[in-house]
Image (tube, rainbow, N blue to C red):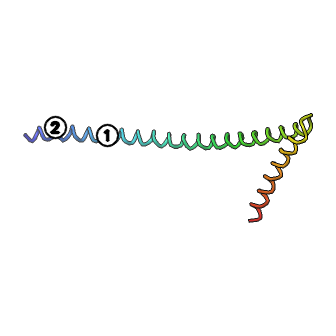
Amino acid sequence: MNEEYNKILDTLKGNIQQIILLYNKEKEINNELSKEVENLNEELNIQQNKYQEIERKYENLKLAKAINSDIEDSEAKLKLNKIIREIDNCIALLNK
């Protein structure tokens, strides 16, 4: 009977050690994946900032083209007024 308990105990110990090894391996994989997620989030933020900058440049280019082209004066004035309002809002925020 004592021999059976020893076998069961040895099997149990082996299983526990195997579970601990698997847990540590999964924990390491999880840490690596977390780092990868952080890196991808940083890259996403960089790309979003680049996109916003390109979008801003595109809007400025459209405005410059509107001013320099044969578009009606009223449309160019509307765009200029929009930019002036945005500048006024920025100034107001800076003054707060």
Within-10-Å neighbours for mark 2: few <14, some 14–19, many 20+: few
Q: Left or right: where does residue 78 sit relative to residue 21?
A: right
Q: Which residue is mark 2?
A: 7
Helix, strand or loop under label 1: helix
Question: Which is nearer the N-term, disc 1 or disc 2?
Answer: 2
Secondary element type, mark 2 = helix
Residue at image point 9% right, 42% down:
2
Tell me where residue 19 sits by quadrant.
Answer: top left
Residue 59: horizontal and vertical position, in percent? Answer: 79, 40
Label 1, label 2: how many angstroms apart (C-alpha)? 18 Å
Residue 57 in the image: x percent, y percent? 80, 41
Task: Identify which amino acid the numbered label 1 is placed on.
Answer: Ile
Compared with 28, 92 (above or below) is below
According to the picture, the residue beneath numbered tag 1 turns out to be 19
The answer to which of 19 and 37 lies nearer the viewer is: 37
Q: Amino acid at mark 2?
A: Lys
Picture coordinates of residue 8, whole percent (x, y): 16, 38
